[in-house]
Image: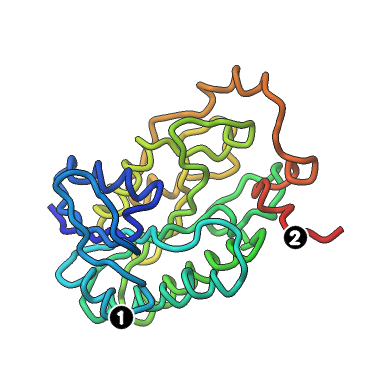
Amino acid sequence: MSIIALSGAEGQIGQILAARLPLLGYTVRPGVFREYSLPEGLQPSAVGDLRDAAVVDTLLEGVHALIHLAGTSVERPLTELIDNNLLALVQIYEGARRHGVRRIVFASSNHAVGMHGVGRYLRPGCDFRPDGWYGLSKMWGEGIGRMYWDKHGVETVAVRIGSCLAQPTEFRHLSTWLSHDDFVRLMDCAVQAPDVGFQVVWGISANTRSYWDNSEAARAIGYWPQDNAETYAADLLLQPNPLDPVAQRYQGGSFVTQDIRP
């Protein structure tokens, strides 16, 4: 089975993969920003800032693929996003090029298209409509993946993650939920699929109310989600929608109304 580098192993969803990928037979080499207690049997392979080429080299030497989860995952000032989501990502791809890493599974985000209205049903090739600086950084990250495939032969599966949670907790999640079990299935498929080149897929479960057509994920990487947020619909529909009226109109939800024009 493959040797997998995992950046951002200390993050909320990184911890899930750090614990569960070894159960699927992977040898996991975790990368963390600072010293962190990982699941039993795992030790960080690289500790430090991914803008540092030496840290990247330590993480990527001898691996078959990288699952790249590290970076800023919320709306933040542009300077922070440039450092963590742009400059560090360039170092990651340059490191993959140096070490002959075949594939990067890139944690993109639904916020790259968050300004689409909730009435739209989107395919992966839809127009980018980022809902903030964070979404814009993910749009740029997908562009890096495209360029490194076209120019340098480094494959990328860009996963536009929805709402990766143990269970949905609000109305919007009926459309955007990605269960933890499906998240692990998706990452496994993204690593194992043959000859993907550059591919964008939605990071969602099989939600009845999904905003996104994920049929290409089944074709391209063999991902068939098993969970459906509709299981929780009866309870969630009894709760007030926490989003304001403007945020309810757009797929990006609350990210849309951060610093929105009057």
Query: Which is more N-terminal, label 1 or label 2?
Result: 1
Amino acid beneath label 2: Asp
Other-residue count near label 1 (Cα within 10 Å), few / some / many at <14 / 14–19 / ≥20: some
Can the viewer see residue 112 in this picture? yes
Can the viewer see residue 196 in this picture? no
Residue highlighted by disc 1: 53
Other-residue count near label 2 (Cα within 10 Å), few / some / many at <14 / 14–19 / ≥20: few
Figure quadrant of the C terminus:
bottom right
Q: CA distance from mark 2 to mark 1?
A: 34 Å
Could you tell me residue 253's position as x and y percent? 67, 46
Q: Vertical placement of 133 versus 26: above or below?
A: below
Residue highlighted by disc 2: 259
Residue depicted at x 27% and y 55%: 191
Q: Vertical placement of 92 versus 113: above or below?
A: below
Amino acid beneath label 1: Ala
Picture quadrant of residue 76: bottom right
Q: Nearer the viewer, residue 257 or 211?
A: 257
